[in-house]
Structure formats: C-alpha cells, structure tokens
Image (spheres, grey):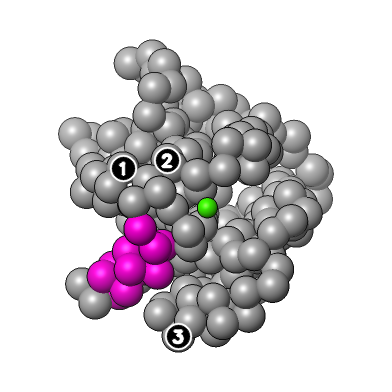
Amino acid sequence: MRILLVEDEPLLGEAVATHLKKLHAVDWLQTLEAASGAMQAITYDLMLLDLNLPDGGGLDLLRSLRKSGQRIPVIVITARDQIRDRIEGLNSGADDYVLKPFDLDELTARIHSLQRRADAMPNPRFMIGNIEVDLAARTVWREAQEIRLTAREYAVLEYFARRLGAIVSKTKLEEALYEFGAEIESNTVEVYVSRLRKKLGSSAIRTVRGLGYRMDP
Ligand code: CA
C-alpha cells in the first residue's frame, strides 16, 4: 500500500513515516502544495492529513478532493483539544481521525481497518485457491501450513489479494511498493513475483503477457 503522509511537525512526521515504512511505501510531505503535486503523479491508497500546515488548512485540501470526486481514504491528524476540528474533519469527508499524541500501532490498526472498509472487505480472512490470507493478522497459510513472508513479499501478495481477478501492471506494483526516491532495480517486481510463486505455488500469480500479472479468486 502506498501512503501519503502530510505533516509538518518534523519529529512526528519522522516517527510516523519510519514506523509505517516497515510495512508500506510512504511519501512524507510537509505542505499542501507538495501534497497536491504528489497526488497528481501518484494514485495513493490512503492519506494521513494534518490540519494545520504552513501553507494552509488540511481541510481545504480534503474538501477540494471530495468535491472532485476523489474517494481516497483519509485519516485526519488533530490536536487533542480541537473537538471542532474533528467534527469539521468528519463533515468534510475524512474517514477517521487520530488525536495527537497517538500510538503508532493503533494508527497502523486504523489504517488497515480503513483499507479493508475501502475495499469493501469486511472479512479480513479469506481463501484464494488453497491459500488462506488474513489481512488483519497479516498471516498467510497454504494447506494448513503458515507461510513466512518478508514485509515486501507480503505487500506484493496483499496488493494482489485486494485486486483478485484484475490485471496488475508492473508499473502499478512498483508505484504501490516504493516511495519517491527509493532505488528500484528494473527486475524487482519479477523477483518478488517469483519468490511468491515459490512459496505459494507456481500458479498463485499468473503472468498476463504484455500487461502484467493477475491473481485469480
Ligand atoms: Ca501542523
């Protein structure tokens, strides 16, 4: 999952970005202008949005996104004493909010729960062929045996699991897995797909010639 974090407090931004990068690709930006620019280039899966930013209010960005029909899940980051902000945030189209200071593991849990809601996947545990995936516990089983995946391998699997039956291009996968500035080898996606096939079975991910890959439901 690729996350856009818009937060101008250096310590908080750093802490959140570092924590989330263990599992996801994160672009951390500190102004509305930078955030708007990034959103034109990249399709993000989720946005974490601070409300008071150097060049304006986060809610203005949120309102304009919703006005233009963008449904990206948004979690607003607000100060503990600003109840009005929270209400206004929810009324402006935020999906959830966290109060500063917040626990990073709780933030991660909220992100994953929001993602499942956005995907219309209320049940985090489901079967794909003979593979069982639990998106909440982040575990994968194959014929009753737990399969150990690295964080990136899991991220690739999750990307497919959330788009069963759809063709996923190499470019989209790279975009979902790596933030700006990350070094990507040209064969990175192929490497991860081949590792997953080894662990999950060679037919788990199909190659769609010239277009990308597909995981069938
Ligand atoms: Ca701020």
In this rendering, position of residue 92 left or right of residue 80: left
Question: Which element is circle 3 on?
Answer: helix
- Residue 55 belongs to the span the image colors magenta: no
Tell me the amino acid under the disc marked 1: Ala
Residue at point 49%, 76% (across, down):
89
**Callout 1: few (<14), some (14-19), or many (20+) C-alpha neighbours within 10 Å?**
few
Circles 2 and 1 in contact, beta carbons < 8 Å: yes
Question: Which element is circle 1 on?
Answer: helix
* Residue position for label 1: 34
Tell me the amino acid under the disc marked 2: Leu
Magenta stretch, residue numbers:
56-66
Q: Is residue 93 above or below residue 8?
A: below
Q: Is residue 64 above or below residue 17?
A: below
The mark nearer the N terminus, 2 or 1, is: 2
Q: Which mark is residue 29?
A: 2
Q: How far, Cα to Cα, is label 1 from label 3? A: 24 Å
Residue at point 47%, 39% (across, down):
28
In this rendering, position of residue 34 left or right of residue 102: left
- Residue 57 belongs to the span the image colors magenta: yes
The secondary structure that dominates the magenta segment is: helix
**Residue 132, quarter of the rendered image:** bottom right
* Residue position for label 3: 91
Question: Which element is circle 2 on?
Answer: strand
Tell me the amino acid under the disc marked 3: Asn
The mark nearer the N terminus, 1 or 3, is: 1
**Callout 2: few (<14), some (14-19), or many (20+) C-alpha neighbours within 10 Å?**
some
Q: Nearer the viewer, residue 158 or 110?
A: 110
Residue at point 31%, 34% (across, down):
170
Q: Does any atom of ligand 1 lie closer than 8 Å to the CB of label 3?
A: no
Q: Position of residue 72 (x, y in %)?
A: 38, 64
